[in-house]
Image (tube, rainbow, N blue to C red):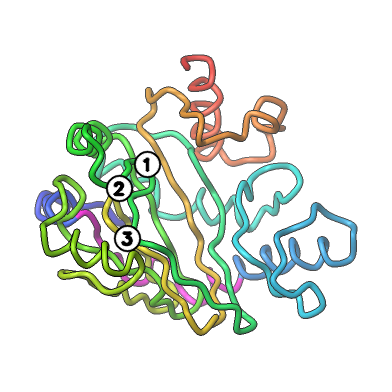
Amino acid sequence: MITLGTAEREHYYEQGFFIVRQLYNEEQMETIKQGIQRIIDRAKSGEGSDVPWINKEKGIVNRIGSMLSPGYFQKELADSLEHSPIIEIIESILEQPIRYSLFGMLASGDGQGYVQNWHRDLVPLNSPSEVTDLLRDARDLCQMNAALFDDRYLTIVPGSHLRKLTDEQNEALRLNPSGSVPGELVVELGAGDAVFYYPNILHRGYNPDGHFRWSLHHAFRTADSPHREYEGQRDWISGVEMERFGPRVRALLERFSKSMVLN
């Protein structure tokens, strides 16, 4: 069991991220990969729901979302959350019970590169209410990437999650919105490692050479947080068969369903 103590929690709030090494061992990763490969094989054959393709002939996919939905459901993936310390870690960070928000995978490959502009996921850069908005969600929302293969495709600026950008950082972004900025850090994950981070930290995806990537990508909010429009997923969550999930994941999804009523 992995939980965060006071020192780790303070690091997360001061820096905007925290890395856990070997969240998954080799056997667990192999099981997860089998579930993902089944989604891909079913989509390629036409038997299952389609996926965003980079190269369908080679079976190379792009980012996949809502992987707990009926069209994608694989027990191995649900169990990768049910039987992992992810829930405890995020509840340690946010110091509250949590609900589901997103369960997907970041993927790339086949030499199809990408370089994102620097951004915060939910708060526009340099907006009049930027700091207020950052502070509002800092103890309500946590995101994670868990690498199934070595991963260095997320770049962040530690400490940028609760304040406006510096003049030097703004000048760098003015000259090149996707280029290097002062204070940046490449998040280096080995297979099985995970980074937990506040998605309003300044960050970018950076994989210009299109290296192969499979990294689980999940997000959670505090249990009483109302549904946000960007979360979507109303189309499948209300009719999903909760019995197919273990009790811990079922609770996350039931709280998510309840959040749609609160909004």
- Of the numbered discs 1 and 2, the one sitting upstream in the chain is 1
Find the residue positioned furthest to the top: 262
- Of the numbered discs 1 and 3, the one sitting upstream in the chain is 1
**Can you identify the residue that label 2 sits on?**
200
Residue shown at 60%/84% (left/top)? 111
Q: Are marks 1 and 2 in contact (CB under 8 Å)?
A: yes
**What range is drawn magenta here?**
16-30
Q: Is residue 31 above or below residue 131?
A: below
Relative side of 98 to 11, left or right: right
Q: SS class of the residue under badge 1?
A: loop
Find the residue positioned furthest to the right: 46
Q: Position of residue 101 (x, y in %)?
A: 48, 39
Relative side of 59 to 207, left or right: right
Which residue type does callout 1 highlight? Leu
Q: Residues within 10 Å of mark 2 (few under 14, many from 20)?
A: many
Q: Position of residue 29 (x, y in %)?
A: 54, 71
Q: SS class of the residue under badge 2?
A: loop
Residue shown at 51%/48% (left/top)? 82
Residue 174, quarter of picture: bottom left
Q: Is residue 42 above or below residue 67?
A: below
Q: SS class of the residue under badge 3?
A: strand
Q: Residues within 10 Å of mark 3 (few under 14, many from 20)?
A: many
Which residue type does callout 3 highlight? His
Quadrant containing the N terminus is bottom left
**Can you identify the residue that label 1 sits on?**
122
Q: Position of residue 214 (x, y in %)?
A: 55, 71
Which residue type does callout 2 highlight? Asn
In reply to whether residue 21 is colored magenta, the answer given is yes
**Can you identify the residue that label 3 sits on?**
203
